[in-house]
Amino acid sequence: MFRRLCVLLAVAALSVSPVAFRSFAKGWEPVRTDVSGLSSVARDNDVEIRVSPGYVVVASSAPVQIKVFTILGQVVSSESLPAGTSRLPLSHGVYIVKAGDITCKIAV
């Protein structure tokens, strides 16, 4: 039984790349300057969600609750962001982002 558990844990550890783990662990960071080259994904009156290679960028005029999920439903981030622009580093993949009243799918 113990041997089987060790094998399962080893397989699970190998299936998560170090890049993905590092990206998830870093967290949201404020963006002080205007970031060019971003693709707008979704927008409403208060919130805009954009993507760039390796990042999801959220700009809001008021504090906003944001959640980022993998396509399999695992929570990557669940934060309350202040007004302004913030970005989250993500590894290559497809994610679901919910910010305020907006929910969208992004590809990084």
Image: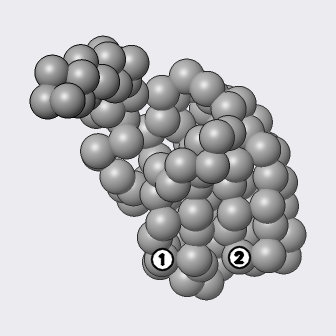
- The reply to whether discs 2 and 1 touch (Cβ–Cβ < 8 Å) is no
- Label 2 sits on residue: 100
Helix, strand or loop under label 2: loop
Q: Is 87 displayed left or right of 97 in the figure?
A: left
Query: Where residue 84 sits in the image (x, y, percent)?
Result: 53, 70
Amino acid type at circle 2 is Gly
What residue is rendered at 58% in x and 54% in y? 68
Residue at the extreme front: 1
Query: Where residue 58 sits in the image (x, y, percent)?
Result: 61, 58
Q: Is residue 103 above or below residue 20?
A: below
Helix, strand or loop under label 1: strand
Q: In the rendered view of the protein, which quadrant contains the C terminus? A: top right
Q: CA distance from mark 2 to mark 1?
A: 10 Å
- Label 1 sits on residue: 80
For the question of whether residue 10 can be seen, the reply is no
Q: Is residue 95 above or below residue 83?
A: above
Residue 61, picture quadrant: bottom right
Q: In the rendered view of the protein, which quadrant contains the N terminus? A: top left
Residue 31, picture quadrant: bottom left
Q: Is 90 displayed left or right of 6 in the figure?
A: right
Q: Is residue 26 above or below residue 65?
A: above
